[in-house]
Image (cartoon, rainbow, N blue to C red):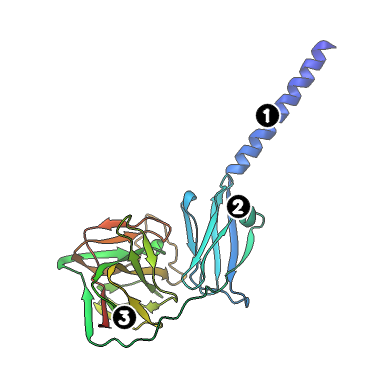
Amino acid sequence: MGVTKILIFCRGLASTLFLLLVICVYSQDDICIYGRVIDTKANGIEYVTLGIPAANVVTITDAEGNFSFSITGSCRDSLMVHHVSYGQKVLSPMDYLRSDSLMITLEDVAHTIDEVMVLGGRKKLSNRGMRIPSAVCTLTPDKIGAEVGSKIEVNRLIEVKEFVFATQKNDIPGLRLSIEVYNIDDADSSLCNVLTHPLYVDIPVSRKKIEHSIIPLERILLNSGSYFVAVRFVDCDESVRWQKEENIIKPSVCFPLFLKDSYKRENIYEKPEQISFNIGMSIIGSGD
């Protein structure tokens, strides 16, 4: 009788260990989360950045606000949701893991209207340095969310009238970039976006160099200081979006390179990396 009890106990223990093993293995499996980001009127919001920085997970919504991403079953970090017009929202794991189909609502951020003032005198600001012959900065469809640009010094108040940059060539169909303007904190090189509305530019497919001129849709006043003026890869044709295979030749967009310090980063949740070149972004505006 004693032996029988011991055997029953061993079998029970083995079953328990097996069950725990199955649970552990299952918890490590990838979980695919789908969803949509909408405003308070239930309209989809395009090009919202969602990320779990601690898990190195970042994605961007499409033109209808739809998104998807995968995480491991053990992920227990917060999901950050960001858009220049809506600020940032943070979802706990309990919020975004309760369903594999999320509906995230963002509310407009109230922005103060600048005091009306008239600034005269046309100015062009750039810090491009010497052109590096034959050198280019390249972005491919697997780099959606990446930012490259130029560091520009502003010595006195200026109202931005135009952004200017060039592409050396582009063979990414449906390529869309956004213009970003960040004030640089000299203490820790952190970036603070000064824009309150997105500014997009569609880049045509071309094997030739094209100069791009973009007029802002809002009034942008820059006080004296250091700024990172960048382009961010936000979208491209679905046929090439998120291509990550190593053995295929990816389409790309190329920017000319200039020999002056600037920054780059893979996504908005990363700390900017200082680099020794820039893509020749310029600002044209009026100042006092």
Distance from label 2 to label 3 (Cα)? Answer: 41 Å
Q: Find disc 1 in the rendering and name its residue.
A: 17
Q: Position of residue 122 (x, y in %)?
A: 23, 85
Q: 10 Å neighbourhood of mark 2: few (<14), some, or many (≥20)?
A: few
Which residue appears at 35% of the width and 86% of the height? Answer: 117
Residue that sits furthest to the right in the current view: 1
Residue that sits furthest to the top in the current view: 2
User: Which quarter of the image is occupied by the C terminus?
Assistant: bottom left
Helix, strand or loop status at disc 2:
helix
Mark 2 against mark 3, which lies toward the viewer? 3
Q: 10 Å neighbourhood of mark 1: few (<14), some, or many (≥20)?
A: few
Vertical arrangement, residue 190 with respect to residue 197, above or below: above
Q: Position of residue 75 (x, y in %)?
A: 56, 47
Query: Mark 2 is on which residue type?
Result: Pro
Looking at the image, tell me whether mark 2 or mark 3 is earlier in sequence order: 2
Helix, strand or loop status at disc 1:
helix
Q: Find disc 3 in the rendering and name its residue.
A: 160
Q: Position of residue 131 (x, y in %)?
A: 15, 68
Helix, strand or loop status at disc 3:
strand
Q: Position of residue 63 (x, y in %)?
A: 51, 74
Looking at the image, tell me whether mark 1 or mark 2 is earlier in sequence order: 1
Q: Find disc 2 in the rendering and name its residue.
A: 93
Q: Are marks 2 and 3 in contact (CB under 8 Å)?
A: no
Which residue appears at 31% of the width and 56% of the height? Answer: 187
Mark 1 against mark 3, which lies toward the viewer? 3
Question: What number is the disc on residue 108?
Answer: none
Query: Mark 1 is on which residue type?
Result: Leu
